[in-house]
Image: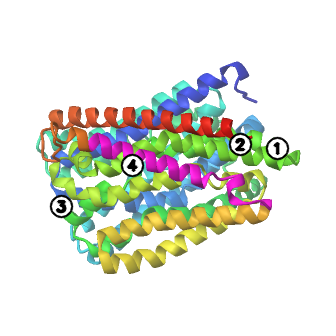
Amino acid sequence: MSRIIPSKIGRQISFVVLGDSFTTASVLASGMVLARLLSKQDMGSYRQVQYLIAFFCGIVELGLSSTTYRFWNTYSERQRSVYVRMMLALTAVLCLLVGILLALLSPVIAHWYRNPSLVGLLVIAMLVPVASVPIMFIRPMLICEGHSLKATGLEVVFAVLPMLGMILPAFFGAGFITCVWLWMICSLVRLPILPIIFRNQLFSPGTPWWDREIQVQVWQFIWPIQASRLPGLLTAFMDKFIMSFFLTPSGFATYSMGARELPFIGNLGPSVSSVLVPNLVLDWEAGNITSMCQRWRKACAHSATLTFPIAIFCIWEARPLMGLLFSGQYEESAIPFRFFAAIALIRVIEFGSLAKVMNETSLILKASIVGVSAFGILGVVLTWGFGVPGMACAVLLAHALTAIYYLQTYRLRIGCNLDAFFPLKQLCLTAGLSILASWVAHTVLNRWLPLSAAAPFGALAWKIGVYFASTILVYSMLMTIQRFFARSSSHDQP
């Protein structure tokens, strides 16, 4: 059985993080380029196709990464071969059915979304799910084998190919339909790597394509994970589905370009949690509740110290940021972007991490249901009354209510007050200092370096850089002053 050499674990993690970062950056970069090459009508249609495919792929991907990480190094060579054959065949069939279903429903979806072009686009993109989900098998297998650098390289190639298939023809003046065709073809080009990577498993003589014991084992592991993911999937995509009903394709393009959480910053909380959980488990098992609470509290405070000034800056300078990223025609995307950037002020940590520590994972499912239920009601009501700001506000409120549910449940379960494990007052102070820093930097600089979303890319980029650097400088000074007074007051106490 393959094992990752302990001395190389740090390097393996670095490669994985590098691959994740590149994938996130490529998604953002492709949006930046396409926003300048496609009309808003076409951009809205393309985004709707992307969201529909991503949602249904999330349902049928069968937790490929989780199951592979769980079982690969525990299976024998024969079991691996059966497992690979079963999962690849099953996901390929399910994804093909999803593509056919979307193609068959395309007239209905086009009517609901008031976008006739979706009929042809969903038919063209019918095979994209087949080209997207099975290749998700490759990365976890390579990581389990200790080949994180190879996994990172393939991750880069897989992210770049479809992106180039859409960008290059658009850059050379091809029509939108031609670009979508080439996007689909470049997605399919990734599939031949599967029989190469899994040649030992797929071409193993005498190996069956199904084994009941493996099927039962994998299914018992998969279904709770998939069930708990469904509310999260609905929360992530429901706002896009609802806004497609209310907006034209052009309006949806404006909304969807701004309706995105902050890249990298939004992942800091979960990253901190993943490192923290092993120590929290030891504290919980040893009955050292005070230490567990202090660790979690400290992690929340440190995460906020890093993320709050960036999130507040993005909220304050949302309009020029949208102009920088997606051009001046998407300046109105700043409205949803401000609400989505504010999610970083809530997600200072993965709130479900304590539930995992206490082995009460059912709490994660309950919290997800609370979030999606609140969002389902708030999304319709607020969008009906306030349009785009209402929907973006509903997303933010749903995250806030989910966090409140977690914190209240933990407070009752642990039997202590909130401040013992969640530094609410300290977070409010950090948010206040971040707001003050952005206000001071903007007020001072705006006299000499006014920002405009319609400014040329280069001029806008360096001006925003100056604003951001000044904001961080002011924030650092304010934090230093605050800590000085905090130490002084603690020394004055008897």
Disc number lying in front (2 or 1): 2
Please tell me whether residue 427 belongs to the stretch shown in magenta: yes
At a point 35% along the width and 36% down the height, the residue shown is 160
At a point 24% along the width and 39% down the height, the residue shown is 444
Q: Which mark is residue 41?
A: 3
Mark found first going from the N terminus, 3 or 4: 3
Q: CA distance from mark 1 to mark 3?
A: 54 Å
Residue indicated by mark 4: 435
Q: Nearer the viewer, residue 60 or 294?
A: 294
Q: Is residue 481 left or right of residue 295?
A: left
Q: Amino acid at mark 2?
A: Arg
Disc number lying in front (1 or 4): 4
Q: CA distance from mark 2 to mark 1?
A: 10 Å
Residue indicated by mark 1: 283
Q: Which mark is residue 295?
A: 2
Q: CA distance from mark 4 to mark 2?
A: 27 Å
Q: Position of residue 394 (x, y in %)?
A: 43, 69
Q: Amino acid at mark 1?
A: Asp
Q: Amino acid at mark 3?
A: Gln
Q: Nearer the viewer, residue 198 or 431?
A: 431
- Quarter of the image that includes the N terminus: top right
Magenta stretch, main secondary structure, is: helix
Mark found first going from the N terminus, 1 or 3: 3
Q: Position of residue 347 (x, y in %)?
A: 53, 52
Please tell me whether residue 379 belongs to the stretch shown in magenta: no
